[in-house]
Amino acid sequence: MISIFVLLTAGATAQHANAADEPTHELVFDKGGKLSFMQTKTESTNIQSALYVVEINFDIQAMDVKQGVTMQFDKEGHKLRLDQQISNTGVAWGHYIDNIKTSGWSELYVDTTQNAEVSNDVRVYSAGYIEGLLTVVRLSEYHANTHKLLMRTEATKHALKNIKDVFKHQIAYMKEKANLIPHILAEEPDDPYWKHARFMLFQLWGLCDGYNLAAGAFGTHKLALEDLLVLNTGGELGEMIQAYTPKAKQDRRSAQNFVQAGEAISFLQRSSQKAKVFMHNLKVRASRDSFLQKKAEPNSTKEDLLDDAHWEKLLAETGHCSALVRVTADNKDLLMGHTTWNDYSTMTRIFKYYNFHFDGAATMATKIAFSSYPGVITSTDNFYIMDSGLAVMDTSIEVLDPFLWDKVEDFPTMPHIPNFVHLMATNRVAKNGAHWARLFQTQNTGTYTSQWMVVDYNRFRPDRDTLGLWTDRGSVPDDTLWIVEAVPGTIHAEDMSFHLREDGYWPSFNRPYFDDVRKASGFENAQKSRGAIYSWLNNPRAQIFKKIAPTINTLQALKLLMTRNFYPNTGVNPIDPGHDISARMDLSPIMPIPNGGIDAKVVNRCLFSKLQAQSISSPSHSAVPAFEWLNEDGLEKFPGMPHDGLPNRWDFNWVHQTPFTPFEPTAPVAIEC
């Protein structure tokens, strides 16, 4: 990739999309008088066709991202126009502050108008466009880094073609359900869920167009919509790669063709020869299941796929995060902490604040704050705080049984939308934890294998003691904490507020809690053969949480816990830098790789009420050496691992994240909580 920093001094600015990039939509007024889009040209997800050509009213190369930009509707010219500076008279506006070199974080703030004369589609497309334009430099770098990582994996997995085929089906299905029809000024669907799915497609398309406009001005590479789909699928991309290798897809097709009982009966009745074929396939499936059992046997001479080395390799490929929900000892505060685990190459971080106003869409969460990345319109870390009163976070659940991928939902028999769209639509319309769980369970594709924690701060009553002056449930009434676990073919949701009341905390660490999910994912058998490392109660991180979580009563204590790595003095077995709360796989004496905890985010009730958070972007460095990409001699510690645009040394401190409203007399002051 050509460095965009070098190209900032290149020739003349291109203020419009190339002539070849004909827009697919035009601006019209609908029958209600709202400014809307109408599709006039068929588009494809694998080309760089702009949805709409925006006029840029300033020199992009001289753009000051801190000052921000505003999308205006030019009534005389009947067009969208982007102006420098922020104005709340526009369709949407936003600004971007890039402090990655000094704090490890950048911050993005994007708002949309509440003007009823502007349709939701135009609002959110404009918001996406602004984000793509403002973050062009970091998006170029982030895409380069993640693409290089993906190609390293693709060299052995060969799954990308199948994954992109899934994207094409998902987008086509979503457009159908969301009433996005060529040559027709389609109205929004009636169902709020599908409304929000529609809005996210417009937002992502706007982001792609805004980025490509700026990329064209700087002379760097453009991105197709499917490139952004890959980035936005980051929360499950590792699992999708496992599920969509050619072998996994073929095995799934065979399994789904032959194991359904109803089909089997009619199949057997048609001919004895076909019956023999069917029985042969059943035997093949049985032998594969038998193999899975044998590979876990301690005396097996074959490769032990459940030993600690393989567990850590699995976490590096698909594992994400440690998390904690904690009610303080005096029942006066409710704390949440989340630590993202990922490749260090992905540390191009943006903490985002979206303030999106939608008319007639049953929106519960207008303001959403979340840790994220360039080009991504959800978190993918999956840490959200919302003005609906809900906070949502997750940790991944590893799939130990490779045959479980046979239960992944595929087109055309089981159509579905992208999971990141499903997640954010659920976030925006959910009224409470139970509602969130019910909505989320309507789709389980099998590749977003996670344990979700949904905390309803509206339910928490810090002024009530455990004797129950307000209710017999005290400070933590029912529906305060919902847990949802999903693996291929199985999803389980339950109100776990009682656990929070009884134990004072809920820990999360890549192992499922519910028995049916443990059995389906292979953890039940793995625990029987390998012991505590696969248990929910006594795995290494569970032991650390069990010892420390009951003592956590302040944000400062929580921050220390969520960034904890005391290797080699972790206090648990196995003694390994990958078994602490914030892993440092790069310190492994056996298989060092630049992977582990890359951040931590914490909130308490006070911070949450203001949509504020405290966050740190760095691998753990309080008790172990700070991570550096280069050795003292300037040579790469991990040759071939990309880190375009990233600082060399990662020893940053905590940052206070807060919403910012430029139209207030003074910027808001971070309040001590």
Image (cartoon, grey):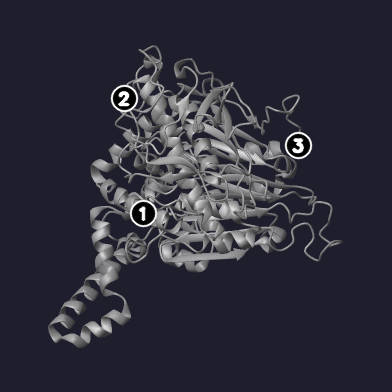
Q: Quadrant of residue 344?
A: top left
Tell me where residue 613 appears, x and y as whole percent: 66, 37
| Label 1 Cα neighbours within 10 Å, binned few <14 / some 14-19 / many ≥20 | some
Q: Looking at the picture, does residue 62 appear above or below residue 594?
A: above
Q: Amino acid at mark 2?
A: Met
Helix, strand, or loop for circle 3? loop
Residue at the far left: name it.
273
Q: Return the mark for residue 172.
A: 1
Residue linked to disc 3: 673
Q: Which one is in front, 266 or 7?
A: 7
Q: Which one is in front, 328 or 98?
A: 98
Q: Amino acid at mark 1?
A: Ala
Helix, strand, or loop for circle 2? loop
Q: Looking at the picture, does residue 247 appear above or below residue 666?
A: below
| Mark 2 or 3, nearer chain start | 2
Q: Quadrant of the N terminus?
A: top left
| Mark 1 or 2, nearer chain start | 2
Q: Quadrant of the C terminus?
A: top right
